[in-house]
Amino acid sequence: MTIKDHYDVVVIGSGPGGLASAISAKKNGAQNVLIIERDVEPGGILLQCIHNGFGLEIFKQDLPGPSYAQRFIDEAFQVGVDFLLDTMVLEITRDHRITATSKHYGFLTIQAKAVILAMGCRERTRSQVRLPGTRPAGVFTAGTAQRWVNVEGYMPGKNFVVLGSGDIGMIMARRLTFEGAKVQRVLEVMPYLSGLMRNYVQCLLDYDIELQLMHTVKNIIGKKRVEAIEAVAVDNKWNYIAGTEEIIPCDTLLLSVGLIPENELSRQVGVLIDPITAGPFVDDGFQTNISGIFSAGNVVHVYDLVDWVTEAGFIAGKSAAKLIQNGHLPPGKTIPVKAGDNVRYVVPHTLNPDHLMDGEILIQMRVRQPIEAPVWVEIRSGEKLLHRKGEPYARPGEMVTIPLKSALLDQVKSANELTVSINMR
Ligand SMILES: Cc1cc2nc3c(=O)[nH]c(=O)nc-3n(C[C@H](O)[C@H](O)[C@H](O)COP(=O)(O)OP(=O)(O)OC[C@H]3O[C@@H](n4cnc5c(N)ncnc54)[C@H](O)[C@@H]3O)c2cc1C
C-alpha cells in the first residue's frame, strides 16, 4: 500500500474508537481516511480481551473482544480505510500535520484536514499509587498479565493477590483461576466496587474469590520475587487501621488501580484537558477546543462498555467528515453542560442545540458515590426540568447515559446552560 502525504482524515489508534471513527468519516463523505497504529495489528486492547461481554448494545450479541474488533476491522477495509501499522505518532500540530515514525516507512509527515485522537488509555502503575515495600519481581498491572496469559501464552505467577476492584482485575482473577492459579483475594481501598457489578458476580462471586472493601496493601515482602503482601484495613480517609494487618503469602500482586487516558499528544498540541476525566473538553461532535481535532473513546473518558466507545467513534467520524466538507463546522450557539448534584463529570462538555435536528444527543456521566436506591437522572435549564430518566441505582463503576431528545430542540435553544444531576427518587 502506498501511503499518501495528504489525507482528509487521519485517525490515531485502531481500537474500537479509532475503527468506528474511520468507518464513519468514510461513510459520511471523507474521500481518504488513514488509521495510524503503533501496534503490529489493528484492534487495540480488545485483542487481549478474549472473554465475552462485548457487543450487547450494538449487535445484541455477546461477543469476545477480538470478534467484536474483527467486525469493524473488516468493515474498515471494505469501505476503503488505509492502515499504517507498526507506526508511532510522535507529534501533531494545530494545522493537522502529523509526524510519525514507522518501521517500514521511516520518519513520516502527513498533512490531514482533520485529525481524530483515539489513543485509548493505559493503566496506573505501582509508582502512581505509591505502594510501599521492596521492589521484587512479581508486581504486574492486570492488563500486562492479561496480555501475557491471553496473547503471549505465559503465566505471570501461581498464587495471586489483586489490588483494586477495577474490571480488568476482576476479569483477570477469573482468567487466572481458569488457568489453575490460586487467587487469594481482591483488596479495594474504597468502600464500594470500582468496576461493573456484573464482573463482580461473574468473576469473583461465581469463583469464590473474596473481595475485601476498605483494604489496601501496606507492604510488599520479598527480595527477588514477591513472597507475601501485608494487607491492612483503612478508614474513610485511607489511614491504616492499626491491628488489622495481615500477611498474605503469594508470589504475584496484580494491580487494577485505574486507567489514565493517553493524552500526551493532545496536551502537546494544546488540546484543553478536563482535570476530572483526564481527557479533552469536547463538544457533542467530540471536537476539542482546536478546530479540526476530534477525539473518541477512552482517550476522552474511561468508558465502561466498549459499545459506547464505538458510538462515540461514529459521532466523531461524522463530525470530522462534516467539517472537511464545509471547511469548518457551521457556527451555532454553544451551551455548556455542567455536572450537578452527585455527578462527578459529564461528557460532552458543551453542545450545539442545532445538532438536535439530526437526532438525539447522548449525555454520559459518572456518579460521585454509589446510590443504592432508585434515582432520577435529570437535565435542567436553570430550575426548569427538561428531561428525566429513572434508574434502579447509580454506581461510580457504571456510566449513566441519558439521551437528549430532538423534541426538546426549542427548549434547549433557549437555555444558557444545562445541568445534569442524579438524585434519589
Ligand atoms: C490494559 C487494558 C485492558 C483492558 N481490558 C478490558 C477488558 O478485559 N474488558 C473490557 O471491557 N475492557 C477492557 N479495557 C477497556 C478497553 O480499553 C476499552 O473498552 C476499549 O478498548 C477502548 O477503545 P479505544 O479505541 O478508546 O482504545 P484502545 O482499544 O486502547 O485503542 C487505542 C489504540 O491507540 C494506539 N495508540 C496509542 N497511542 C498511539 C500513538 N502515539 N501512535 C499510534 N498508535 C497509538 C494503541 O496502540 C491502541 O491500539 C481494557 C483497557 C486496558 C488499558
Image: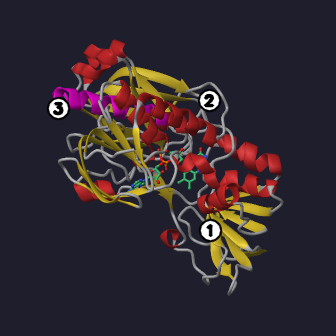
Q: Quadrant of the N terminus?
A: top left
Furthest residue in direction top, as rendered: 407
Position of residue 81 in the picture relative to residue 292 (left or right):
right
Residue 3 lies in the magenta stretch? no
Q: Which residues are magenta?
A: 310-331
Give x and y (percent) for residue 174: 75, 52
Do the residues under discs 1 and 2 have CB atoms within 8 angstroms? no
Dot 1: what SS?
strand
**Quarter location, residue 363:** top left
Q: CA distance from mark 1 to mark 3?
A: 46 Å
Corner quadrant of residue 246: bottom right
Asked whether residue 216 appears in the rendered view, the answer is yes
Tell me the residue at 68%/87% (across/down): 223
Mark 1 Cβ inside 8 Å of ligand 1: no
Above or below: residue 383 compared with residue 393: above
| Dot 3 amino acid type | His
Q: Helix, strand or loop at disc 2? A: loop
Residue appearing at x 49%, y 58% in the figure: 122
Residue type at mark 1 is Phe
Q: Disc 3 and disc 2: Cα gap in Å?
A: 35 Å
Say whether residue 416 is visible: no
Ligand 1 within 8 Å of the CB at mark 3: no
Mark 3 or 2: in front is 3
Which of the labelled discs sits on residue 328, or is there none? 3
Residue type, mark 2 in image = Leu
